[in-house]
Amino acid sequence: MWDTSSALANLFNALCVCRIRPAVR
């Protein structure tokens, strides 16, 4: 079964990485 927390964390992580990736460079 899929957990809502997992899905939310995955989305949040992707957003954080997408925002931090360009900022770090």
Image: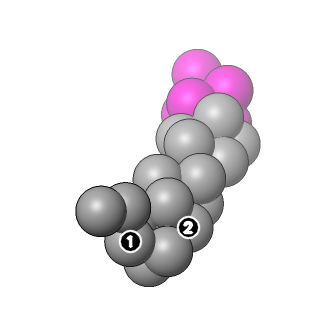
Q: Secondary structure at mark 2?
A: helix
Task: Mark yes or no: residue 2 visible.
Answer: yes
- Where residue 20 sits, quadrant-wise, is top right
- Residue 11 falls within the magenta-colored stretch: no
**Mark 1: which amino acid?**
Asp
Q: Circle 1 sits on which residue?
A: 3
Q: Would residue 19 be found to the left or right of residue 16 on screen?
A: right
Q: Residue furthest bottom?
A: 5
Disc number lying in front (2 or 1) = 1
Q: Residue at x 44, y 77 (%)?
A: 5
Q: Circle 2 sits on which residue?
A: 8
Question: Between residues 24 and 1, which one lies in front from this camera angle?
Answer: 1
Percent across and percent down for residue 13 are 49, 53
Number of numbered markers: 2
Q: Residue at x 47, y 53 (%)?
A: 10
Percent across and percent down for residue 9 are 46, 65
- Where residue 8 sits, quadrant-wise, is bottom right
Q: Secondary structure at mark 1?
A: loop
Question: Between residues 1 and 10, which one lies in front from this camera angle?
Answer: 1
- Name the colour scheme: one colour
Q: Residue at x 64, y 35 (%)?
A: 18
Query: For the N terminus, which image quadrant?
Result: bottom left
